[in-house]
Amino acid sequence: MNEASFSRPEVREELQRWMGLVEALGIPLDRSQVKSLVKSIGGPVGRARWRAMKPFRGIFDLTGTGQGWALFATADSHPQRLEVWIGVGDEEVLVSRRADPAYPHLARELAFRRVRGVYDSVTGKPKGTYRRFTRWVAERTFEAYPEAEWVRVQQVRTHTVLPWEKEDGQEVVRYALTHERSDG
């Protein structure tokens, strides 16, 4: 954890939850003290893990069994879902929504982990291959929907809350790219 980490919405939200817990327990810490505590614990713990894993790195590299990412490092309270829309005349029709059986177009292909890796963005911006990926989706969608005049591929960022928190219905469309049938 560093200062830049605290500007991410999911980290700010998690810090707010920790503040609520600290307050509920009656511990007299303010926000800056909790941030300092997180940074002071996170750094040494991360370094200790790195040192503990160092003797095994050669084996992991040789066998391809190392884990190169922090699995569940932080819960994502602002996940994104992929949607595919088509334009037919004056109508916009949703044909695909990730993990939603009501909109099954390309569901198998989009659920495949290597394909999902192209569009699941955790860095705050789409990967460099995202434009080509949306073109690929558009080509398959034009084949499946000959009446479609255009195809829009987009990410919708939502906001999940804990069960006891009030839902806010927050949705933000991101990385929308539209392809016209005439684009070839």
Image: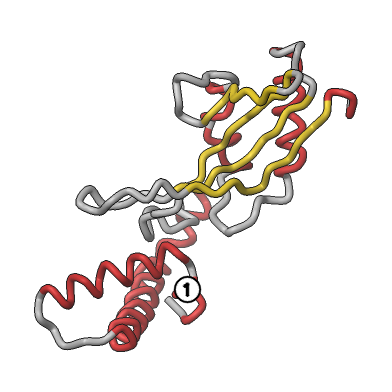
Residue 66 x %, y %: 46, 53
- Extreme-left residue of the structure: 26
Apparent side of residue 139 relative to residue 29 in the rendered image (left or right): right
* 133 over 18 or under it: above or below: above
Which of 91/152 is in front? 91
Mark 1 Cα shell of 10 Å, populated few (<14), some (14-19), many (≥20) = few
- Which residue is pictured at 32% across the width and 72% down the height? 15
Residue drawn at the location 68% of the way across and 22% of the way down:
91
Mark 1 belongs to which amino acid?
Ser
Q: Position of residue 78 (x, y in %)?
A: 44, 53
Residue 65 visible to the viewer: no
Q: Position of residue 144 (x, y in %)?
A: 69, 13
Secondary structure at badge 1 equals helix
Residue 59 is left or right of residue 124, and the answer is left
User: Split into 4 quadrants, where in the image is the C terminus?
Assistant: top right
Which residue is label 1 attached to? 5
* Residue under the image location 73 percent in, 19 percent down: 88
